[in-house]
Image (tube, rainbow, N blue to C red):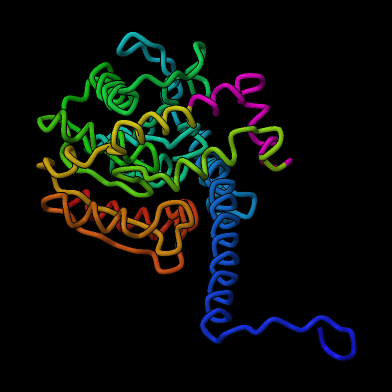
Amino acid sequence: LKSSGELAKPKVTPAAALAFARAARRSREMAAVAMRRVARLSQQVTSRTVVDAAAPAGLLRCRAVASAAASSKMVEANGRSFLVMSTGSTGSPVICMPGAMGTAETDFSGQLAGFAGSHQVVSFDPRGYGKSRPPVRDWPVDFYNRDAEDAHAIMKVLGFDSYSVVGWSDGANAAVILAARRPEAVRKLVIFGGNAWVEQEDIDSYEATRDVKKNWSKRMLALHEPVYGDELQPMWDGFCDAMKGIMERGGDICKGEAQSLKCPTFVLAGAKDPIVPNYHPEWFAKNIPNARLHFFPDGKHNIHIKYNDEFNKMVLEFLAE
C-alpha cells in the first residue's frame, strides 16, 4: 500500500504492453472480418437470385425485351421437366446456366436479349428452381454434375449437338463440369463468379445466414418468399448442408475438371467481387488450358448485369473468333 492508502499500480513491462496491444488489435480485426463475411453472404443470397433494384434502365429494358421476345416452354429432359427460355433463330447455339436459386429470367435476361442477333440463345430454370418445380430442389453429392447433365440433355432435346456454354456463379461450376464431361459437345466456355473449391471460412459464412427469418433482411425475404414460399427455408438449409458436405469431402468442386478442359475458355470477374475472391478466377485462368482472363476493375459479382453492354460485346467477340 502507498502511504496515502491507495493500492499501488502494478508495473507493466513494455513487452507486456505490446503483447496486450497486439491481442486487442487482433480481436478487433477478427470481429471486423466476421462482420464482413456475414455481410458478404447476405449480398450473395441476393445478388445470385435477382437483378438489383438499382440496375441500369437499359438492363431493365433488356429484361422486358427478353421476356417479350423469348420463347418459353416446358422441356422434358434427363427425367425432369424444365422451364426453358430461348431467343434468336440463326447462328451457333449458346446455353446460359444460372446461379444458385436463380432462373433464366432473373439471371440471363440481358444475354437472352443481347446475344439473340447472332446466336440461338437458351437458358433454363435449373431443377427445383423457379418454374422447374415441383419437385423442389434437392442436394445429392453430385448435384453440380447433375446440373451439367441437365443442361446437356436440354440442348439435345432442342436439337443441338454442339454448343457454347455461359455459366454464372454456381452455374459456372456446373458449366466447367459440363465442358469437361462433354468435350465433343462444348465448343467454347465462358465462366464468371464461380469457385473451384470451398474453404472453412465459406462454410462459417453460410452457417451465419442459415436461419432465413432471423438472419436475412426484410428486403431479401420479400424478394424470395413470393417465389419459393414455405420451401425457402428447407431449400436454403439444403444448400448450406450441401456446402458442408463438399467441405467434409475435401472442398473440391471442379478443380480436376477445369484442368482437363479442351475448349477455348474465357474467364471474367469483378475485381471487387465480395462473394468470390480474385484468387478463384485467377486460379481458373492459370489452370484451364487455353484460357484468358478479364477483370472489370470496379465490378462485383453481377458483372453481366452491371456492365451488360460491355460484357455482351466481349463475350460475343470471343464466341465469334
Q: Say which residue appears at 66% left-offset and 40% top-offset.
A: 216
**Does 167 sit above or below residue 104?**
below
Q: Nearer the viewer, residue 151 or 67?
A: 151
Q: Position of residue 229 (x, y in %)?
A: 66, 22
Picture quarter containing residue 222? top right
Q: Position of residue 254 (x, y in %)?
A: 24, 38
Q: Say which residue appears at 71% left-offset and 32% top-offset.
A: 213
**Does 66 sit above or below residue 317?**
above
Task: Judge whether residue 176 can be spotted in this image.
Answer: yes
Name the chief secondary structure element in magenta: helix
Q: Nearer the viewer, residue 54 or 274?
A: 274
Q: Position of residue 280 (x, y in %)?
A: 31, 53
Q: Say which residue appears at 21% left-offset and 56% top-offset.
A: 285
Q: Say which residue appears at 33% left-offset and 46% top-offset.
A: 195
Task: Judge whether residue 57 can be spotted in this image.
Answer: no
Is 314 part of what is drawn in magenta? no
Q: Position of residue 60 (x, y in %)?
A: 57, 48
Q: Can you say which quadrant of the picture contains the N terminus?
A: bottom right
Residue lying farthest to the top in this orientation? 79
Residue lying farthest to the bottom in this orientation? 3
Q: Nearer the viewer, residue 126 or 195?
A: 195
Q: Nearer the viewer, residue 231 or 263?
A: 231
Q: Is residue 316 left or right of residue 85?
A: left
Which segment is the magenta one? 218-238
**Does 265 sit above or below residue 96?**
below
Q: How many marks?
A: 0
**Does 175 sit above or below residue 140?**
below
